[in-house]
Image: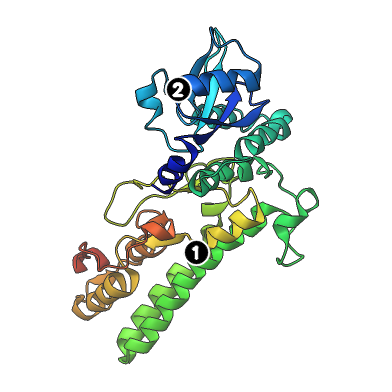
Amino acid sequence: MFTRFLSLFNGGMRAYKVQDVKRERRVGVTAKTFNDLLVKGCEKLQLDPETVTIVLEDDGTLVDSNTFFQKLPAQTVLVFLREGEKWGGAGALIHDALSKLYNVSRKAEIASEIRELLVGEGSPEKVHIISQYLEMLQTDPNAEYRYEDEDWFEGLNKKYKTKQEVMRNNAQTRIRSYFNSAKEQIEKEVKDPETKEILTECLDQMSNRLKKNDFHGGYFDRTARPAERICDKQGWFQCQGPFDSERCDSFHTINPYASRGYRQLFGLWNLDHVIEKSREILPTLLQAVKVKQKHEEVHWEHVYKLLFTRDNLKLVQVGCHKKAARTQTCDVRDFLVSS
């Protein structure tokens, strides 16, 4: 509105940006009409107005009439095409860059192209989106050892020599915290010596299984077996969506192996229990001990599955993590098995 108001004092003139298809030249022009833009733009870019086609930089929309031109805001970027040239929009450039993302030999060249795309860009939103791709190009997700990517290991214990070791420890730390919090809750809530003895034996069984399974460090280890790891072999993790959804509708992804920043952001991703640990699993376990018959034992393997395995765990980006009470409940009979 303000730029339209200003144009009244300039005889209807407004400022635009024009460029050629290769983005080798981008210049500013002022124009009142479409024909005015065509003539001045061709003069600046040294093109023949008889053979030029004009499109919007954003999406390649054809601009070929004064009526449509008058609806464009000031500072719109327009691409002047020679005969035979095509422009798919800025998005096409990004798509092309993404398709070559793993072409290591061209990373510097592609990053340079994206930087040129950002130069002079007036939309902070567009700059933010495109810069995400630029940041990814400047990382090295394939580097594994400390000597290959010292920056990735900044702030970490010197004992870690590989990214694999760090990520395994990350997963193990989370699983250990689930075991420790379960143990603390049981010790706090259970006073009866007989009940406590049964639950202590259950905890010991699960502890031994966790040690045997290396506390499921493979969940975050890209070198682990495909059936165990949550990521792919390059280290990419995909959000599995809220506890009440089958998928993440926002398509959140992250590769903590790619850079120190992504590694730190991965700390905001939750290994979330679908059936809640503190409000569902453990209370049901306590109830099972109370109602069990002499011929029954606590089905600790079922408890283990719910607390520590992917049968009941989902990796969720913080934006998809819901703290609302779960609707899914445990069946106390599943926690008991005949001896």
Q: Going by the image, does 118 lie left or right of 175?
A: right
Find out whether the residues at labels 1 and 2 contact each other: C-beta distance under 8 Å: no
When asked about the image quadrant of residue 323, the answer is bottom left
Residue at 35% across / 54% down in the picture?
311
Measure the C-alpha gap from mark 1 to mark 2: 72 Å
Looking at numbered disc 1 in the image, what kind of residue is underneath it? Leu
Classify 146 as above or below 193.
Answer: above
Residue 301 is labelled as none
Residue 23 lies, in percent from the top left, at: 64, 26
When asked about the image quadrant of residue 127, the answer is top right
**Visible in this render: residue 35?**
yes
* Front residue of 112 and 267: 112
- Which one is closest to the eye, mark 1 or mark 2? 2
Q: Quadrant of the C terminus?
A: bottom left
Residue 165 lies, in percent from the top left, at: 66, 57
Looking at numbered disc 2 in the image, what kind of residue is underneath it? Phe
Question: Which residue, given by chain and number where applicable, does mark 1 sit on?
Answer: 210
Residue 34 is labelled as 2
Classify 221 as above or below 41.
Answer: below
**N-terminal-most mark, 1 or 2:** 2
User: Callout 2: helix, strand or loop?
Assistant: helix
Residue 315 lies, in percent from the top left, at: 43, 55
Q: Going by the image, does 22 lie left or right of 175?
A: right
User: Callout 1: helix, strand or loop?
Assistant: helix
Classify 289 as above or below 137.
Answer: below
Residue neighbourhood size for the residue with mark 1, other residues' Cα within 10 Å, grouped as few (<14), some (14–19), many (≥20):
some
